[in-house]
Image (tube, helix red, strand yellow):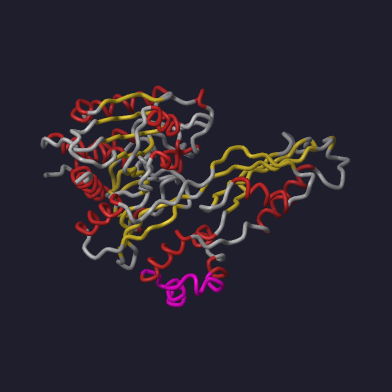
Amino acid sequence: MAYDNNLFMEHLRKMIQIPTVSNADPDKMDVDAFLKLHAYLEEAYPLVHQKMTREVIGRAGLLYTWKGNGKSSHLPLMMTAHLDVVPEGDWSMWKYPPFSGEVAEGFIWGRGATDSKCNIQAYMDALELLIAEGFEPEYDLYFGFGYNEEIMGGPEPAAQLIADTLRERNVKLGCLIDECGGIQKTADGDQYGTIYICEKGYADFEFSKTDNGGHSAVPDKHSALGRVCEAACILEANPMKPVLTEAAVKQMEATAPFIKDEHLAELCRDVRKNWDELCSLMAENPAYNAMIRTTTAVTMAGGSAQANVMPERAWIVANNRLLPGQTLDDLWAHYKEILPEDIDIRLVKGSNPPAVQSTDTYAYKLISSIVEDKYPGLTLIPSMLCGGTDSRYYCDLCPTNSVYRFTGLSWDPRWDGVSHKVNERIPCDVLENNVDFYVRLFRQYGK
């Protein structure tokens, strides 16, 4: 099969040029932008739209269905990603305009280039190519694209609406694959694969204090804002205790050969034996620390509207990411224990961590075999995603415990971790490999 990387680039550029920014208030969402993206997908992928049934779910979600020929006994395969992107931020800080899809310096620039329009582009291009060659799946194939993943679903999570639609139809999935993961290339030339078998839960908690307010010229000893600032310090000084999860053990031990710090690498070769020392070392590194505990990050604050007015109500918000095995109730109990009684606690929104998925499944072994064929000798590391994806809404639809977060992308230092920053961009030369992974997956699944 011949791949046209220039065509892949053009498809992704055109998607980036449509500003599908999600909004926490559904009524403020620019639905027309999403509908414009729907129309572009239909224009760019005519064969996909001839073979697959497309439904609009909610305000702008998309559910594609292709009923296979029934020759395979495997449950359906589903691919998910999201149409929405985060706000672009300060335009003056962008090297190229955030919705230009500019091709320059070996990259495609723009909001959504990596998160996650590149996934939609790769799924669609892979299937379009296969259909042109006469492909017909022996299994049922679904694509599900939400429109508010970047705000963790908000008041009407699109992925939940799509999952509910499948649930009403009694659909059970054999495997679901979402964004994140892929081939990691280090600055030293090492290479390994990362497949996320679980992700952390999510919670926004508000902590507030009410007061009489008044004139700042005659303040009380403590203001409401002063009290919630004290609460912020308490939160940071009293994190949830570290917990060693099975997912973290697998990840650390598999990563040990690639850790440059020799002492740390030696400790990671037997995580349980060296847990006490590892725990203290990992707590000092934000990335490692997030693997071993539920995290709390104080991110927002508010008080009075003017400098000379004592606040009648002050508040802070902390964003939390929950370890698999811990719950919103556990976090709430922790906060009640460490904070003064006069601080009001409110859960703004949140969800418990989804179930950890198995590495002993047909789908996991298939992904591993595709990776091994493309990159002989490569280590595939089962890992825990510290962020969150729409995949969490589908876990109960997958009795095989095969919900994974993996792509065919090759991540290297050029990317600079820019998915939510200004100057989000993707190297032009990684698109072909991404498409190729899904071509192989769609061909081989169900065999």
Horizontally, is 40 left or right of 305 in the view? left
**Camera-side residue: 118 or 390?**
390
Magenta-span inclusion, residue 17? no
Q: Compared with residue 388, is residue 359 higher up or lower down, i.e. above or below?
A: below
Lateral position of residue 431 relative to residue 150, left or right: left
Total marks placed? 0
Q: Position of residue 230 (x, y in %)?
A: 74, 51
Residue at 18 percent across and 33 percent down: it is 69
Percent position of residue 144, x then y = 35, 34
Q: Which quarter of the rendering shows the N terminus?
A: top left
Query: Where is residue 264 drawn, in percent x and y?
Result: 46, 73
The residue shown at (41%, 62%) is 251
Q: Position of residue 331 (x, y in %)?
A: 63, 49
Q: Is residue 279 above or below residue 176?
A: below
Residue beneath the point at 79% across and 46% down: 341
274 in magenta: yes
Looking at the image, which residue is at 36% across and 71% down?
Answer: 257
Report whether residue 88 is seen: no
Drawn side of residue 442 relative to residue 272, left or right: left
- In the rendered view, would you say 144 is above or below 55? below
Q: Nearer the viewer, residue 311 or 284?
A: 284
Q: Which range of residues does the magenta coloring cover? A: 258-278
Q: Is residue 149 visible?
A: yes
